Image: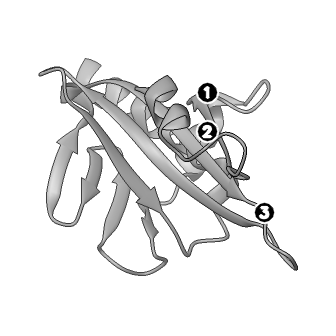
Amino acid sequence: MCLDEVRDSGWWIFNKKTISFKKTEFIDECNIQIIQQLPDNISFPKKSDKVIIDDKGIKNEGVMYSWGDIIATGVKNEKIPMEYMDDDKISVLIGLTNGQIKEIPIRDNIDYRNQVGHLIELYKLKFKKHADT
């Protein structure tokens, strides 16, 4: 899917955007105690219910994807160079147990935008701890 996305993003000669994919992971050596300091959820756009990530899963426009149904997560970063300021578009990719891959755009929450992969891993860990108890 990732290779198709890059290949289909335009003519190579004229294509100025770059697309990268990265598996979600903890930032460096994070202290697991930070789980107690996690907000109840994070939302994109901020203070909305369009996209919500919490310890239950990822909710996108009313559709809930439970961590139990998600087998893989990643972050897609699309950078489009512009004259005065680059346009960065970030999406969360989720692989589901039924074989589907969903892309969920992340926008308008500067506080968490660059940490979304790390936060997803923390929420997954919190979900697992609740499931084990």
In the picture of the structure, the residue carrying the numbered disc 2 is 118
Query: Quarter holding the N terminus?
Result: top left
Residue 133 visible here: no
Which is nearer the eye, 45 or 30?
A: 45
| Res 125 quadrant in image | top left
> Is disc 3 surrounded by few (<14), some (14 to 19) or many (20+) residues within 10 Å?
few
Label 3 secondary element = loop
Q: Nearer the viewer, residue 39 or 91?
A: 91
Query: How far from the left and from the top, in percent, is residue 101?
Result: 28, 32
Type of amino acid under label 1: Glu
Q: Position of residue 78 (x, y in %)?
A: 62, 51
Up-down: is 9 above or below 121? Answer: below
Q: Is 68 located above or below residue 42 in the figure?
A: above
Residue located at (59% from left, 32% from top): 21
Q: Which residue is mark 1?
A: 25
> Whole-Å distance between the Cαs marked 3 and 1?
26 Å
